[in-house]
Image: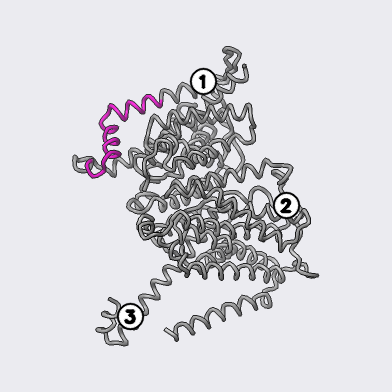
Amino acid sequence: MDLFFQQIFNGIMMGSTYAVVALGLTLVYGILHIPNFAHGHLYMLGAYVSFFAITSHGLGFWAAMAVSVAVLALLGIVVERVVYRPLKDQPHINSFISAIGALMILETWVIVTWGPQAQRIPNPYPGAVELLGITMTQQRLLLIVSAMVLIILLQIFIKKTTPGTAIEAVAQNREGAMLVGINVDRIFSLTFAISTGTAAIAATLVAPIFMISPAMGALLGMKAFVIVILGGLGSIPGAIVGGYFLGIVEALGGGYISADYKDVIAFGALLLILAVKPNGLFGKEVA
Amino acid sequence: MAVKFIREKWFYLLLLAVSLALPLVITDRYIFQIIIMSMVFSIATLSMNLILGYTGQASLAHAGFFAIGAYGLGIMTKAGLSFWLALPAASLLSALVGFIIGLPTLRTRGSYFAIVTLCFGVIVYIVIGNLVEITGGQTGLLGIPLPQLGGLVFNTHKSQYYLVLAFLLLTLFVMHRLVYSLLGLGFMSVRNNEALAESLGINTFATKIISFMTANFFAGMAGGIYASLMGSISPSVASFSHTFFWLVYLMLGGVATLAGPIIGAFAIPVLMEYLQFLQEYRLIIFGALLIIIIMYFPRGLMGGINSLRDKLSKAYKLRKTGGKDGITANK
């Protein structure tokens, strides 16, 4: 039973990362209809910016996170401008190919700058807590709690503030939003900044627990796509629930079935579910 | 029209003569190696072109099917089967897996299809890396025998060159026949407007499955040739960076043209040889190229050449007929 709870705990921890990253992706993919396939790579870059700030400039953990969020939010705006905006009125697949170009650039940039080997961010909260026979480090608990706070803050932002409702308005009807005086281009930039900024937070929280490497973004980005598609394109609750669900299923699968095939679960589930429902679980038609 | 036909025929004959005579000129082993690999990747890129370029379905599992062909051939020839039986068998295996995977995935559209095929590619990669008893796990398969024909072992670069050239010509021939057939028109109609194609009585799902299986057959064949020439393979053949490379070759050379994939598969590796000092930054250049092409030259090099030729011939006609007839003829 201890193993079970330990795996559930680990699952919730990984699920927190998945949920935050998928949430950012669902904003741009589901709401702006941009298949930002470089999302996982921007997440990876977020971890590296924090790493750089901590090891080269001696910044504290939280200060480094702030720097990382700022840099990534800015980079998100740039990526949207350069990589996606010129292709706005073209088929989805063109943006997808453009995104592949962007992720090649991002990954190689990190490899050239910091090398292909894995790096480690010093753990700011190494203490361990024992609860009901489960060992949890403070950093892991911090990740879970921070992710929840972040998710709640994002919900409040979208539902209660003016820029947030403007994002929803653009999602519902782009022309209508323009008519009532919303600057759609600016909303695109804002949404991208939020999406990549939150990815940077998730990456920085996870970085002290696992090693960071240039390849860490690719698989995570794909899993985020799986979550977004299965949870319903543009559905925020779908992304959150889907993220935690995938984290727990993977942890249990990894603990009880096979650790080697842990990553197959998400992708296999996508194949199986799309076989039955080609538009995803809560399917909306995509162009 | 006839003149044009004859002229084109001479052009292709000349190209064939050059490619047949090439080994007489080139003696450098290293350059040979690059050319042979470019030809193998030309086959892979041509097959990707069928599903992505002509049928409009961005399959990103291509390296996965390449790997299925490579491992299929490796395992079969190591078990004692002849190359000439193992290669079609491995290609058929790849096409068969394509059929099974195509059934669920081809019902999805646009970026969903791209993501779901990419996911399948990763599954292939993980499975190959973990099935240690069959695939050798991360070490891979070693000691795959070279192809043989009668008493001839393809162990020199020259013989390997002609072997791969034969397969490349075969692929080109099949692609040419396919693309200019009624079925090929069906592929393109699915790409241009799936709903319209369906309303014309085309079974779009069957059309997509046929295109996907054919593309995967040739991807598997390219993988099989690769495995037997290299002699050893590891799970990295299934890595999606291969798929991305072929995508760059295809987009640069010209999507939905027959010459484009070959031009791309030759131009980029050769270019990279001259830009050795940029080796580290290679992928940055690839990525930037991909973005620039998709934005400004979505039809690639061949598309650019074709539209330039159209413009020139229009201008030529215009001058010959004194302007008036040329314009009406074009209308």
State the image coordinates of residue A61 (x, y, percent, origin top left): 49, 27
State the image coordinates of residue B218 (x, y, percent, origin top left): 59, 60
Q: Nearer the viewer, residue B214 or A263?
A: B214
Residue depicted at 55% across the width and 59% down the height: B214
- Report the magenta residues as a range: A150-176
Q: Label 1 sits on what residue type?
A: Leu
Residue at mark 2 shares a chain with residue at mark 1: no
Q: CA distance from mark 2 to mark 1?
A: 47 Å
Q: Look at the numbered disc 3 and give the secondary structure of its residue.
A: helix
Q: Residue A141, labelled with which disc?
A: 1
CA neighbours of label 3 inside 10 A, class few (<14), some (14 to 19), many (20+): some
Q: State which chain disc 3 sits on.
A: B
Q: Nearer the viewer, residue A210 or B99?
A: B99
Q: Nearer the viewer, mark 3 or mark 1?
A: 3
Q: Residue B75, labelled with which disc?
A: 2
Residue denoted by label 3? B315
Which comes before the other along the chain, label 2 or label 3? Answer: 2
State the image coordinates of residue A150 (x, y, percent, origin top left): 41, 26
Q: Label 3 sits on what residue type?
A: Ala
